[in-house]
Image: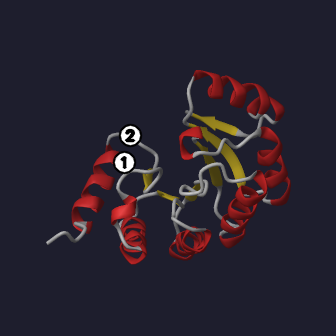
Amino acid sequence: NREPDFDALVKKGHELIEAGMSAVVYCGSMGDWPLLTEAQRQEGVARLVAAGIPTIVGTGAVNSKEAVSHAAHAEKVGAQGLMVIPRVLSRGASPTAQKAHFSAILKAAPSLPAVIYNSPYYGFATRADLFFELRREFPNLIGFKEFGGAADMRYAAEFITSQDDSVTLMA
């Protein structure tokens, strides 16, 4: 019937936690989230959280308004954190536009720890200056997820995590 199987989602979430994961990331990068409606994505989050599964919510969306909606919903239902994803359909977006996008998301869920998901494949690379500018304004920004290649990982290690020991680098 082409509807999401939320029971299977919750079952898989429990399996992952029982296997030793500390949380699940729901709609964390590109994956199949574009096939879901905003309501379906939010129902998936609500079901995972209600089942007691620690859930990190990906904020990928076709526009900032939807990304903000996902962040606010995540905070409202008790998710554990956010994976903040750049404007995915804005190839070559300016740092100013990305800052506005990231800021709106972080502002929508100030109590949730958040990680910036950096993937140059999205058409924008988050650099250290922007990351630390955001971090000064949003203390809930605690980490940086790098998805680029070896050079991007070296950059993140040298210019982001080496600048602040409290920042977590994820690969």
Can you say which quadrant of the picture contains the C terminus? top right
Q: What percent of the width, then of the height, locates residue 27? A: 43, 57
In the rendered image, the vertical position of residue 157 relative to residue 37, given as above or below = above
Is residue 66 shown left or right of residue 128? left
Locate residue 8: give its quadrant.
Answer: bottom left
Q: Nearer the viewer, residue 78 or 133?
A: 133
Gap in angstroms between the C-alphas marked 2 and 1: 5 Å
**Residue at 56% over, 32% down:** 148
Its colouring scheme is: secondary structure
**Residue at 38% over, 51% down:** 31
Locate residue 32: give its quadrant.
Answer: bottom left
Helix, strand or loop for disc 2: loop
User: Mark 1 Cα within 10 Å, few/some/many (few <14, many 20+)?
Assistant: some
Residue type (three-letter) at the residue carrying disc 1: Ile
Q: What percent of the width, then of the height, locates residue 1? A: 14, 72
**Residue at 65% over, 56% down:** 113
Q: Which residue in the protein does label 1 denote?
A: 17
Q: Which residue in the protein does label 2 denote?
A: 20
Helix, strand or loop for disc 1: helix
